[in-house]
Structure formats: structure tokens, C-alpha cells
Image (tube, coloured by chain):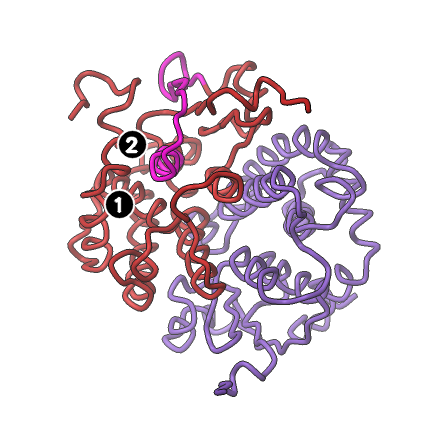
Chain colours: A purple, B red
Amino acid sequence: MHISLSCLSKPILHGYFRSSCSWRVRIAFALKGIEFDQVPVNLIKDGGQQLTDQYKQLNPMQQVPAVHIDGIILSQSLAVIQYLEETRPGPRLLPADPVKRAQVRMVSDIIASGIQPLQNLCVLQKIGAEKAQWAQHFIQRGFEALEPILKETAGKYCIGDEISMADICLVPQVYNADRFKVDVDQFPTIKRLNQTLMELDAFKVSHPSCQPDTPADMRA
Amino acid sequence: MHISLSCLSKPILHGYFRSSCSWRVRIAFALKGIEFDQVPVNLIKDGGQQLTDQYKQLNPMQQVPAVHIDGIILSQSLAVIQYLEETRPGPRLLPADPVKRAQVRMVSDIIASGIQPLQNLCVLQKIGAEKAQWAQHFIQRGFEALEPILKETAGKYCIGDEISMADICLVPQVYNADRFKVDVDQFPTIKRLNQTLMELDAFKVSHPSCQPDTPADMRA
């Protein structure tokens, strides 16, 4: 049997400490107990290291994260997380019940397609001077939709009492909301879920404040 | 055994003829051979029917589509499509191989998170006068990334020779590219895949030009 060397090595996460999509992948690795290496891609330094020809080979979208795993390169955090789910043992990141799985994907996509893309770096750079208000507007709008949905679906976590991909998406988005000064007190369900989740080791060890590339003045 | 009436009735798609995310769901229904009813939500008329309190109950994001199926309401087209995949028989919309499944989700999410959200109606309305150039910029940028990825992954269709969710996302995005005057001739793989897919009945019957709510002057 031929096993390529790349399948035996640890996955490599090309990411950035403060990128919410990189954080999602770090949480998934932590929840599954998978060891991985990190290669920092500084989105600000040198005009943005994600724009180099070298990085463009990894992810033509010129965004983080990109994950080297099992001999392939995957971008798009939810594709990475669901690949881990379908190939790795450990705690489930999607529930067994099809309705709950659909709700997990719905909540994940409200964040990953409905909120985060609008406050992505390449978008804010194009907006220019008004970027803080722009990001605030779309996070506020998204959380106003998410709150009543989570009020229906949540138990201890976003969908019932099992941690899932939806929780993996929620916490980094709340971090972004704080960053852009959206008052999360307006959204009691979101706030309560975030507090509960931030008690967990997988969310703590993956936090932007304690990554290899976190600058000294932003360390916890 | 108790079977609720809602499980016996046809799914209802609340959508709009020209919405690319509604079209994705129509393609999935067609590929799976699932009969469904359509309730038009006119995004322009009356200042936008998606903004009514009644519609907000269905989808707090105030976007289409929302699908009433098996007694629940689902929004987010990829969550709906994967729910159909996991609960309905018929042709697979995701391949069996985990690497290919991941590539399908990666391509789907490049479109659903990386391109489409930036040319969504609520974003273009906020951009105002520059909206056509804005949409063009982000579709162009997205297709420049998608082309080399699809060149690697494509066979007859986006990922190998099996139709998948990635194809369901690609065709409506090419339609949007045409609408915003992005020259698809720049992207030979995207162009070739779109032409091949548009030969198929499931893509034809679901096309924006022939829906119940297509205005007379836009009918094929």
C-alpha cells in the first residue's frame, strides 16, 4: 500500500491570528483534538502577505485560511471544517439528525455568507473612510436576524445542547462585533451563547489573543 | 405512527425569479426530481416584499430564498441543498469521496461566501450610484480565483465528471456576471462548464426566464 508522506504529516494552517475564518478552523482542530502547524500570513504587513504570488498559489482568492491537509490544499473555512468532520474521529461538529444538521448549516451560512464577507478586509479597503460604519451596519443587521433564529434553535449551544459548526462560526463573529463596536447586549441569546462557549478550552486556546503571530501588545 | 401533514405536502419555495440563490434551490429540486410550489417574493415591488413583517417571520435576514419543508423553514440555499441531499433520494449532489466533497464545498463557498454576498441587493442598495462597478469588481475578482481552481478540479463538470452543488452555484453566478457585464470569455473553464450545464434540463427549467413570476418582457 502506498501512503504519501503528506498524509502522515500534520495539517498546516496558513492563517492570521485576528482573521475570524482562521479562528473557525483553529476551533475545529481544537475540538477534534487534531495537532496542526500554523504558518502566519500577515494581512497588513508588506501591503498584505496574502497578495504575494506564492500565497496566491495556495489560495487564489488571496484570503486566509488555506489548509494543507492529506496532500491537498483547501480554502473556505466551512469546507475545511466539514472535511475534518467527514475524515477525522472525535466529537461530532454536525449533529446526526438531518433537521438539526440543516439548522447548523443555516446558522453557519448566515454568518459565513450573510455577515462575515461584508466586513472582510478586501471589502473594507474598497469602502475606505466609512469602513467602520459599513461593518457595523452589516454586523448589526445580521445579528438582528440571528437573534430570533437562535432563540428558537438554541439549547445550551446554538443548535440544541451539542456543540456544532454553528458555534464555531458564532464566537469569532461576536469577536468581530466587539471589534467594530456593535453592542452585543442588544442580543441576549447571542451574548449568552458566546459566554458559555468562551468557557471551553477549544475556544480559549484558539483565541486571537494567544496565537504564534499575535503581536505582543495584543496578547492576553 | 404520527406523520404530520406538513411532511406530506410539497415543499414551498419562497423566492424570486432573478435571485441567484433562489435559482440554486430550483436547480437542486429539478436535479432530484422533487415537485415543489413557488411563492414569489418580489424584491423590487412595494419597496421590496422581503421587508414585510410577514416575510421576516419566514426569514429574519429578509432575503430569498426561504423554503418550507417537512414542517420547518430553512433559509440559506446551501443549507437547503444539503438538507435535500441528506433526506431525499435521487442523483447525488455531493460526491462520495471526501476530498471531492471538500472541493465541491470549497467551490460552492467561494461563490456563496466570496462572490454572491457582495452583489446582493441589500449591499448594492447601500453602495448606491457606483453599484454596477462594485458588483463587477467583486465578480471579476472572484472569477479570477475560481478559474485556476476549476481548471484543476473540473472534468465534464466543476468537480470531476459528476454534477454537484458546485455546478448548482456556478451557473447562477455566471448569469449574474452577464447581468453586471463581466466578460466571461476571460475565463475559458468557467465558460465551458456553464455552456455544458446549460444544456441540461434541470438548469433550463429552473432558469430565471421561465418562472411563474418572470415578467412578460423578460421571458425567454
Highlighted range, magenta: B23-49
Residue kind at label 1, given as amino acid type: Val
Question: What residue sits 64% from the left and 76% below the top?
Answer: A36
Tell me the CA gap for discs 2 and 1. Answer: 15 Å
Using the rendered image of the protein, determine whether residue A130 is visible from the camera's viewpoint.
no
Local SS, label 2: loop
Q: Of B47 and B49, which appears nearest the observer?
A: B49
Q: Residue at x 22, y 59 (%)?
A: B189
Q: Could you tell whether A48 is left or right of B170 in the image? A: right
In the image, taking residue A194 as reference, residue B137 lies left or right, namely left
Q: Which residue is mark 1?
A: B174
Can you tell which of label 2 and label 1 is closer to the viewer? 2
**Would residue B31 be counted in the magenta stretch?**
yes
What residue occupies the far front of the structure in this picture? B1
Q: Which mark is residue B206?
A: 2
Asked whether residue B71 appears in the rendered view, the answer is yes
Residue A60 placement: quadrant: bottom left
The structure residue drawn at horizontal position 18% and vertical position 59%, both measured from the top left corner, is B188
The amino acid on which the numbered mark 2 sits, given as a three-letter code, is: Ser
In this picture, is A198 found above or below B160?
above
**Closer-to-camera residue (A192/B122):** A192
Q: Mark 2 — on which chain does it sit? A: B
Quadrant (top left, top right, bottom left, bottom right) of the C terminus of chain B: top left
Residue A9 percent location from the top left of the image: 58, 83
Question: Residue B149's spot in the image, x, y percent?
Answer: 34, 64
Give whichever of discs 2 and 1 has the lower sequence position: 1
| Relative height, residue A56 to residue B109 (above, below) | below
Q: Which mark is residue A114?
A: none
Is residue A178 within the magenta segment? no
Quarter of the image with the N terminus of chain B in it: top right
